[in-house]
């Protein structure tokens, strides 16, 4: 079986086995379960409780601002862009709408390696579902993209036996 992360040291593989064993022993879902984070630049592997993941790796929530969410809803209902914008300005105020747009575009320019609120919530939901199923428990490993790159963080689900990994780009 090919190892998708061949650069991991034996010590790091041991850490992963320890965290997988912790999952095996866990009575069920909780915010204390580990999420493994691998910093590729420094080959640093660490664990963060799932409840602390958003604080350690803040997701980009700029696209989920209420002003932008409402604008997208109005567009989806078939309203022209200008009309949708005017309705949002009436509902939230023009300054608030402009600030939401500014924050959104700043985050787009700065980049967040695709780590959005939606991806964060998908990881938490998938983790919970895996913990509540009868299947062997899998540890989420986020391989962090290199700073300054356009790459997205990569999510892998580690399986207990042999540290085989299933990669998902979500």
Image (spheres, rainbow, N blue to C red):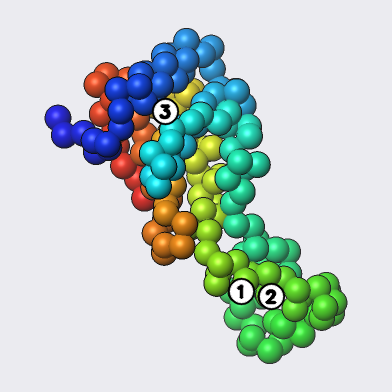
Q: Nearer the viewer, residue 40 or 156?
A: 40
Q: Residue at x 43, y 33 (%)?
A: 45
User: Mark 2 and 3 residues: CB-CB less than 8 Å, in contact?
Assistant: no
Q: Position of residue 149 (x, y in %)?
A: 42, 62
Q: List the residue tagged with mark 1.
A: 105
Q: Is residue 141 above or below residue 97?
A: above
In percent of width and height, residue 90 lies at 84, 79
Q: Which residue is mark 2?
A: 102
| Closer-to-camera residue (27/46) | 46
Residue occupied by mark 3 = 139
Q: CA distance from mark 2 to mark 1?
A: 5 Å
Foreground of the two, 9 or 129: 9
C-alpha gap between disc 2 and disc 3: 37 Å
Q: SS at mark 2?
A: helix
Q: Residue at x 38, y 39 (%)?
A: 43
Sequence-first tag of 3 and 1: 1
Q: Residues within 10 Å of mark 3 (few under 14, many from 20)?
A: many
Residue at screen point 54% across, 37% down: 124
Per the image, label 1 sits on a secondary structure element best described as: helix
Quadrant for the N terminus, please: top left
Which residue occupies the extreme front position in the image?
42
Q: Is residue 5 above or below residue 13?
A: below
Residue 135, horizontal then vertical, whole percent: 36, 22
Q: Quadrant of residue 56?
A: top right
Q: Position of residue 123 (x, y in %)?
A: 49, 41
Label 2 close to label 1 by CB (< 8 Å): yes
Alpha-carbon span between mark 3 and mark 1? 33 Å
Q: Is residue 53 left or right of residue 162?
A: right
């Amino acid at each position: 079986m090919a190892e998708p992360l061949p650069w991991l040291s034996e010590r790091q593989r041991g850490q992963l086995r320890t965290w997988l064993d912790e999952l095996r022993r866990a009575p069920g879902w909780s915010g204390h379960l580990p999420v493994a984070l691998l910093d590729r630049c420094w080959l640093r592997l660490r664990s963060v409780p799932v409840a602390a993941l958003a604080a350690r790796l803040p997701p980009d929530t700029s696209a989920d601002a209420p002003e932008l969410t409402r604008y997208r809803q109005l567009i989806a209902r078939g309203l022209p862009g200008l009309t949708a914008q005017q309705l949002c300005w009436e509902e939230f105020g023009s300054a608030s709408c402009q600030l939401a747009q500014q924050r959104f575009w700043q985050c787009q320019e700065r980049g967040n390696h695709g780590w959005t609120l939606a991806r964060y919530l998908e990881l938490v939901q998938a983790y919970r579902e895996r913990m509540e199923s009868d299947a062997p428990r899998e540890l989420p490993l986020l391989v962090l993209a290199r700073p300054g790159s356009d790459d997205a963080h990569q999510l892998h689900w580690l399986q207990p036996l042999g540290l085989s990994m299933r990669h998902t780009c979500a």
